[in-house]
Amino acid sequence: MGFLRKAFNKPSLLVPAVSIVLGLICGAIAMLAGGYDPLLAYMSLVKKVFGSAYNIGETIRAITPLLFTGAAIAFAFRTGLFNIGAEGQFIMGMTGATIVGVTLQLPWFIHLPLAVMAGGLFGGLWAAIAGYLKANRGVNEVISSIMLNWIALFLSNFIVAKFLVLKGEQKSRPIHESASAKIKFLSEAMDHARVHWGIVIAIIVIVVFYFLLWRSKRGYELRAVGHNPNAALYAGINVKKTIVKSMFISGIFAGLGGAFETLGVFGNQLVSAGMPGYGFDGIAVALIGGNTPVGVLLGAMLLGGLNYGAAGMSFGADVPTEVVRIVIGSIIFFVASHGLVIFFLKPLLKRRADKREGGGTV
């Protein structure tokens, strides 16, 4: 409960809240400079997100992968590691799920869980490579995980094109129906929006993130190594093993996101020219959320809503969708510039404190 109190105390809530407001203001200024109506644009964005059952379902679909990658990056950061390779782990998760979903024919109650586990395992093992290089060779995980992103993309393309390709197409054969993660009854109720079981698993991942790090002995060891590896080693913790374990768990989270993107949204995997971007957006989610489970949940909802609602701004107010990236970038800037936001908040907080003191002396 102490952690939750810290997550919801005034400073921890005020900084991201003010950052969001400042980000929206920056977006409005950019729109005004371009001759657009910011009020109409933001109203169009909200209408796009909440305007119909289909749009609500698609917004949930857009939020889901960000929950996985945000949790992956925040988890690693809490253990002293900067896992910038969530993008590659996400791609490997897609590939693992596609291999099992396409090549095997099993009953749904075996096939779907097996495909999901394969995706998580592929992502975890891919992240563990960077963890091993960090622990045993002293290679900075930022550099190795960036390189592994590109290796994952091209390895994934090779596997799909060589072994899983649909003849005459630049994509894999469709997964079997028994491996599909779509929630059919909910999809039909939401005008065939692409909602899937990934949102349920993503919420479970957020809960696991909290209980594993703050309510278990293993989590204490992971955080101890992150805070001070030398002190952790002196206390008898196997630092090298713990670093690999941290990256492996982080990679599992990202890999699960990739698995559900294949199994719940597309039903196949493309031979891609570029990366999907969810891993990099996950960095923004983790930053906005202060690397906390609750913060990741809220950050993913914000970014997922902004990304999906950007099309509404384009159709409703003729605003380029790139303006949303300006808003997101501004929010991240202000969250990262913690001291700058506090500078803006100081007069307000001081005034409130003075009023409280004045009221107490009367």
Image: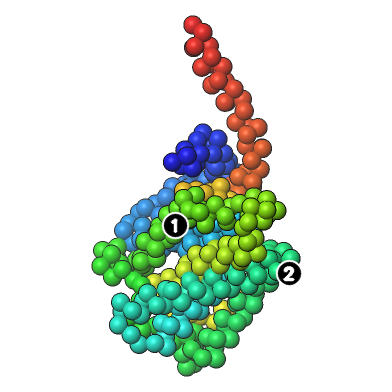
Which residue lies under the disc numbered 2?
Answer: 137
Which residue lies under the disc numbered 1?
Answer: 208
Q: Is residue 48 placed above or below 98 in the rendered structure?
A: above
Determine if residue 355 is in view. yes
Query: How many neighbours does mark 2 have within 10 angstroms: few (below 14), some (14-19), or many (20 or more)?
Result: few
Is residue 197 left or right of 99 when viewed as pictured?
left
Q: Earlier in the sequence, mark 1 or mark 2?
A: 2
Question: Front-most of 137 and 284?
Answer: 137
Residue shown at 68% from the left, 50% from the top: 231
Percent position of residue 83, x then y: 62, 62
Percent position of residue 139, x then y: 73, 67
What secondary structure is found at the residue carrying circle 2? helix
Residue shown at 36% from the left, 67% from the top: 196
Question: Front-most of 229 and 273?
Answer: 229
Query: How many neighbours does mark 1 have within 10 angstroms: few (below 14), some (14-19), or many (20 or more)?
Result: some
Is residue 55 left or right of 158 when viewed as pictured?
left
Residue shown at 57% from the left, 42% from the top: 19
Amino acid type at mark 1: Val
Q: Is residue 152 placed above or below 244 in the rendered structure?
A: below
Determine if residue 307 is in view. no
Question: Front-most of 218 and 40?
Answer: 218
Amino acid type at mark 2: Arg
Quadrant for residue 267, please give it. bottom left
Percent position of residue 43, x then y: 44, 47
Percent position of residue 210, x then y: 47, 52
- Do the residues bearing badges 1 and 2 touch, measured as CB atoms within 8 Å? no
